Image (cartoon, grey):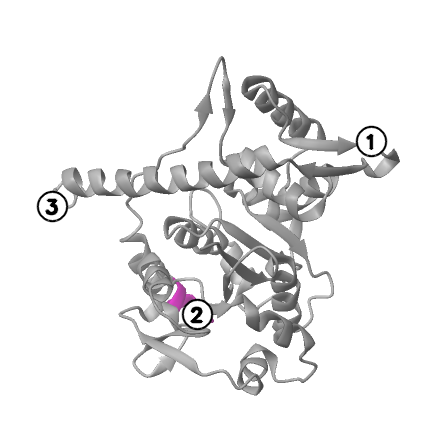
């Protein structure tokens, strides 16, 4: 099952400027924390909707392999949700949604939600619903058509679909980081669970030629039909994108992208059937490698006093 995620990060929030002083140097930013938790749970098709300080956020997260959309009006959160859901509606069967103001939910919460049935699945901590919310993709058209002023919560309510609340042991799923004290306390708690193995899976022939960056690029070309637009959404330069594609095709011996030149917009592009099959196979392989790495890590380090 293909699962995506939308992160609303467009609006300037009351604590944003205060947080900037804490997000320098080697600190893991709030945006990176959310992306990391999704990716560690196996959710790789992630859209972040930016607006306020978009360039700074996108630059900092360029290495994460996610898609960026711009909500330059910085309007209501629902508008950002709609942008992200519109982008993922035809490529995912389920989609997470969360906001940057609730950044400290854990990987375990994401995994627990994924294990649940239901068209709307919401984490519950001490009787309070939180983030991220997991939605069945079939609900997206109703959300996109909602024109009320009640936000995503109201859009889901009027859909008439029953919500499945799942009890989690995760204070971060319901806590908004509105105060410096909250931030520091939750950051320390979240940091304690960050130790993990990290592997970068790549295919190599004469040279390395296929990895997470290639997957991200191909997924965007598949969605947008344009190499240039795919580069804009992922922060990859146009020249680098073509180098990635040409290297992969040389090593593979077949085309993974069919292109039709066309003026200043770069023409149309289409991921070939072989390219799509390679994408699916690689992502399954990558996920199994990650799971096996986690198993080996736990074998050697789970009961260790080294950390």
**183 shown above or below 23:** below
The CA distance from mark 3 to mark 1 is 57 Å
Q: Residues within 10 Å of mark 2 (few under 14, many from 20)?
A: many
Foreground disc of the pair 2, 1: 1
The CA distance from mark 2 to mark 1 is 43 Å
Q: Residues within 10 Å of mark 3 (few under 14, many from 20)?
A: few
Secondary element under disc 3, as helix, strand or loop, is loop
The CA distance from mark 3 to mark 2 is 30 Å
- Depth check, front residue: 14 or 120: 120
The residue singled out by tag 1 in the image is 261
Asked if the magenta segment contains residue 268, the reply would be no
Where residue 240 sits, quadrant-wise, is top right
Secondary element under disc 2, as helix, strand or loop, is loop
Which numbered disc, 3 or 1, marks the residue that appears first in the sequence? Answer: 1
Residue furthest to the top? 206
Which numbered disc, 3 or 2, marks the residue that appears first in the sequence? Answer: 2
**198 shown above or below 90:** above
Which numbered disc, 2 or 1, marks the residue that appears first in the sequence? Answer: 2
Write the start and end of the magenta stretch as one range.
178-183
Name the disc covering residue 131, or none: 2
The residue singled out by tag 3 in the image is 303
**Residue in the picture at 57% in, 87% down:** 158
**Residue in the picture at 51% in, 66% down:** 97
Quarter in which the N terminus is drawn: bottom left
**Residue in the picture at 64% in, 22% down:** 246
Q: Residue 211: x and y, percent?
A: 49, 31
**Residue in the picture at 52% in, 51% down:** 45
Whether residue 254 sits left or right of residue 123 in the image: it is right
Q: Main secondary structure of the magenta part?
A: helix
């Amino acid at each position: 099952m293909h699962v995506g995620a939308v992160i609303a990060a467009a609006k300037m929030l009351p604590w944003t400027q205060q947080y900037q002083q804490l997000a320098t140097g080697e600190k893991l930013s709030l945006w990176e924390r959310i992306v990391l938790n999704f990716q560690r749970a196996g959710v790789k098709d992630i859209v972040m909707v930016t607006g306020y300080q978009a360039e700074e956020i996108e630059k900092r997260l360029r290495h994460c392999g996610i898609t960026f959309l711009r909500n330059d009006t910085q309007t209501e959160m629902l508008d950002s949700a709609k942008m992200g859901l519109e982008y993922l509606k035809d490529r995912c069967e389920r989609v997470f949604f969360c906001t940057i103001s609730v950044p400290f939910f854990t990987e375990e919460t994401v995994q627990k939600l994924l294990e649940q049935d239901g068209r709307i699945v919401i984490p519950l901590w001490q009787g309070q619903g939180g983030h991220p919310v997991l939605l069945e993709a079939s609900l997206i058209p109703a959300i996109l058509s909602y024109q009320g002023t009640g936000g995503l919560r109201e859009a889901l309510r009027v859909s008439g679909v029953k919500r499945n609340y799942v009890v989690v042991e995760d204070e971060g799923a319901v806590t908004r980081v509105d105060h410096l004290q909250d931030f520091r306390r939750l950051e320390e708690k979240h940091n304690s669970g960050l130790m993990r193995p990290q592997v970068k899976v790549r295919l190599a022939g004469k040279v390395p030629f296929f990895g997470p960056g290639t997957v991200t690029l191909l997924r965007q070309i598949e969605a947008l039909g344009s190499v240039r637009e795919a580069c804009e959404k992922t922060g990859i330069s146009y020249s680098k994108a073509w180098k990635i594609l040409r290297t992969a095709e040389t090593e593979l011996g077949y085309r993974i992208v069919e292109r039709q030149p066309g003026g200043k917009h770069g023409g149309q592009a289409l991921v070939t059937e072989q390219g799509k099959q390679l994408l699916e196979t690689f992502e399954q392989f990558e996920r199994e490698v990650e799971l096996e790495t986690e198993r080996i890590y736990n074998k050697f380090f789970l009961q260790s006093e080294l950390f």
